[in-house]
Image (cartoon, rainbow, N blue to C red):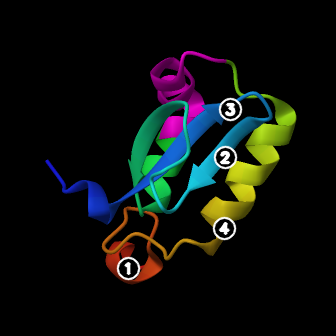
Amino acid sequence: MHEKKALIRLVRTSEGIVIDPGGKIAGRGAYLHEQRSCWEKGLKGSLARALKTEITETDREVLMSFLATLPKDPFSANDESVSGK
């Protein structure tokens, strides 16, 4: 288990899903690691279940934009240096 400080909080608000870097926004929240693989997995369904909502296209675009800023996972199976490709 990771400390909350090492995780990124997302919150379901009336405006949609928002990233809560300070951890203070009111609303139902969920936490993800700062790893692309966790975000990709979360966007496949577990995040929506945790937040008890459906992820709209607008929410998905915002979350995918944030995901693009995350560093690549170390030793990922898709990493060319690991797979030898």
Say whether marks 3 and 2 touch (CB < 8 Å).
yes
Q: Nearer the viewer, residue 22 or 36?
A: 22
In the rendered structure, which amino acid carries the disc numbered 1?
Gly
Pointer 2 or 4: first along the chain = 2
Quadrant position of residue 30: top left
Residue 34 lies in magenta, yes or no?
A: no
| Left or right placement of residue 64 versus residue 72 in this view | right
Point out which mark residue 18 bears: 2
The mark that comes first in sequence, 1 or 4, is 4
Q: Nearer the viewer, mark 1 or mark 4?
A: 4
- Name which residue lies at 51% across and 62% down: 21
Mark 2 vs mark 4, CA separation in Å = 16 Å
10 Å crowding of disc 2: few (<14), some (14-19), many (20+): some
Name the secondary structure under disc 1: loop
Q: Disc 4 marks which amino acid?
A: Ala
Which is in the foreground here, disc 2 or disc 4?
2
| Residue matched to label 3 | 13
What's the distance in space between the residues labelled 1 and 4, CA to CA? 24 Å
Where 60 falls versus 24 (above or below)? Answer: above
Q: Nearer the viewer, mark 3 or mark 1?
A: 3
Residue 7, percent from left and from top? 35, 57
The residue singled out by tag 4 in the image is 68
User: Which of the marked residues, 3 or 1, is nearer the chain's N terminus?
Assistant: 3
